[in-house]
Structures are given as C-alpha cells and as structure tokens.
Image: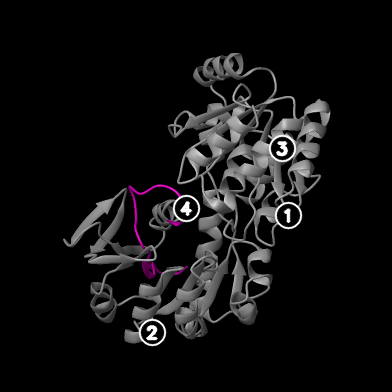
Amino acid sequence: MPFRPRVIHVGKYYWPVKGGIENHCYHLCTRLAKHVEITVVVSATGWRAAVETVDGVKVVRVPRYAEIARTPMSPGLFSYLRRADADIVHVHVPNPMAAAAVLAVRPRGKLIVMYHSDIIRQKRLFELYRGIDRAFLSRADGIIASTPQNMEYSPILRRFRDRIRIIPYGVNPDDFAMTPEREERVRKLRKRFGPRVVFFVGRHVYYKGIEYLIRAMKSVDAHLVVGSDGPLTAELKQLTRSLDLTARVTFAGRIPEDDLPCYYHASDIFCLPSVARSEAFGIVQLEAMACGVPVVSTRLTTGVVYVNQDGVTGLTVPPGDSPALAEALNRLLRDEPLRRRLGTQGRERVYREFTHEINASRTLQLYADVLSGKPIRGC
C-alpha cells in the first residue's frame, strides 16, 4: 500500500478477553498495526469509557449499560462512528449493536465485515434482527468468511457471494512447539493417563457434542481427557459415572494456556465431536495439528471439515454418531503409521495455510483491493 490507511475495527470486547472472536481480533490487529493506523472500538466492561494502548494498538472502550443475548448495549458506539474519519471500518459480527450503528450513522470509509458465524440458537431474536443484518451486509464493500463452507451453507452469506473473500483464521504454530521443559511435562502426563490418550478441550456446551464422545469411549481402549468446563460439566460427569467410565475419563478442568500444548503433545488423537453449526471453524483443531496430532471431527456444514480434511489431517464422521466416533478413534489407535502421517500432514497444513501472519497478510491485501476498486470474489 502506498500509504497507511486509517482503519477502525469494531468488535464486542478486546484483550485481555481470550478466546473466540476476541482472540482473533487481538492477533489480527496487533499485526495490522505495523502497516495501518488502527483503532479498535469495543464495549467496556462497565459504564466508564476508556482509551488505552494495548500491545501497540489504540483501544477505545465505550460504556456498556446492559447485555442482551450476549450483545453489549453500548449506545456510545453510534456517536463515536458518527465522528470517525477512517479509510476502512472493519466490523466483526455477529454484533447487532455494531450493525445498527453502522446503518444509522453511515461512517466514512469502506466497510469490511468479518462474518464469524450465523446466529444459530437465538432464533426468535434473529428474526427481529434479520432485516438489519441483510441491510448491513448489503452496504459492505467486502465480506470475510473463514471458509468456503461458511459461505455456501449460510442462509445469509450465500446471497453476497460476489463480495466475499475467504480468509481462514490462524494460530502461531511456534507457540505449540515441543521444548525440553514441555518434554518433561508431557512425560508426566503420559505416565498419568497411560499409553493411549484421546483429548478434547472446549466449553462444555450443547453444540460441542461431548456426550457422544463419552459414549463412544465404551468401545475404545484408551483414556479420554476432557479439558475446560461449562454449563454441562456436571451432567457430563454424571453420564461418565452412569457408563462406569470414571477410571478412563478425566475431567481436567481449565488448562492453563502455557500447559495446553503439553496436553496436545501427550495425546494420540484430538477429538472435536461437535453436533451443530454453532461450531463454525474449530480453532482447537489447528492447535492440535500444530502439535502433529491427528484429528477426529464431525462432518458439519461449516468450516470444521475445511480445517480437518478427511484422510489428510485426520478422520471425519457423521455428527451425533457415537459408534462412528469409536470406529474412527480405534482405527487411528490401531494404526501408528497412519497417525504419524496424518499428524505430519496436519502440521504442514497449519504452516502453509493457517497462521496469524497469513491471516493478517490476506486481510491487508483485501484492504488494498477494496481501496483500489479491484474485484473481491475470486481473489
């Protein structure tokens, strides 16, 4: 780019919130800041406004007065965008408040929308929001989808194909590299869990399908380690007891970020048994692949199958099918050469397609194309 564009990123929250959209926004913006003049506008955690610099990025926090259906109510966003002078306004959705603000005040600058996922569960609220969503996307000069599946199977996105650019999420593979310190920790985890380990990590919520994985373990001679927690944790533990699997299923709770790579490396297989389109991508698959661990996941109509390619980086099975999960896990546990091949190919795929640097570079190219009037689709 011949100049440093002024870019405003609009999200719900920002660092130090970790995970999901916020984590992606953090890694993207800290890298974009080397090439553009960037300001991130998000909701504060309370009624007080704040302006600060976070890892080289200017962050404006507008007051939040309430939260409805996980959407912060921050009317100050309207006045901020009305005054803003930017070359690009980059909005992360779903975020009904941000969409409404952009439609109402029509801020200066090209509009880029990062469409992270459809609204799946709040169907009644989405019906009220549908008109706003379509009008908002109709204004976009460019729309980012993380995978082709997220575009093709979205009832909203597929009508805007002509302005969509596919830019997958990323990880920093070096964060998951084996080190001498990690080798010792991995050895201890292996000693604790045994020679055959299946690992899952993610919030214990309905769409993760963890119960199907636990049921599958009745037919799998291995130890299942379930990381993190959530509203279904107690129910999942009760299911484990009822199936007499307490000796072969460990609920590890929230695993510290620095310790998470050790759990991946101590595993033979990572499993993501999700059952609903709320699982739009599955970044945990990238983390496992970065560690050279093959993945077993489900054939959802989302980016999950784009990340973990059947027979290339792991195996895929129908969602909600415990016998199929057991069969895939057993196949990999029996075949060490297959596990090694899929694990190696997974690591190579991460370095080739799914790093934060690649994500930021492709986003910068989209900015340049939008500002110069080049076509978006097909690039």
| Foreground tag (4 vs 1) | 1
Of pointers 4 and 2, the one earlier in the residue sequence: 4
- Among numbered discs 1 and 2, the one appearing first in the sequence: 2
What's under tag 3, amino acid-wise?
A: Ala
Is residue 195 positioned above or below 321 on the image? above
The residue beneath circle 2 is: 103
Query: Which sits earlier in the primary sequence, circle 4 or circle 1?
Result: 4
Q: Is residue 351 above or below residue 100?
A: above
Which residue does the image show at 62% across and 38% down from the upper left? 288
Tell me the element at label 1: loop
- Foreground residue, 199 or 142? 199
Name of the residue lying farthest toward the left: 48
Q: Residues within 10 Å of mark 2 (few under 14, many from 20)?
A: some
Residue at position x 61%, y 61% in the image: 277
| Measured Cα–Cα span from mark 4 to mark 1 | 21 Å
Distance of mark 4 from mark 2, alpha carbons? 25 Å
Q: Label 2 vs label 3: CA separation?
A: 48 Å
Q: How far apart, in angstroms, are the residues tagged by discs 1 and 2? A: 36 Å
Between marks 1 and 2 in the image, the one whose residue lies nearer the viewer: 1
**Residue 263 at x, y = what percent?**
56, 28
Mark in front: 2 vs 3: 3
Q: Which residue is mark 3?
A: 216
* Of the image marks 1 and 3, the number of the one nearer the N terminus: 3
| Mark-to-mark CA distance, 1 and 3 | 17 Å
Q: Secondary structure at mark 4?
A: helix
Q: Residue 20's mark?
A: 4
Which three-letter amino acid code belongs to the residue tagged 4? Answer: Gly
Residue at the disc numbered 1: 299
Q: Secondary structure at mark 2?
A: helix
Distance (Cα) linking label 4 and label 3: 27 Å
> Magenta span: helix, strand or loop, mainly?
loop
Q: Which residues are magenta?
A: 1-21
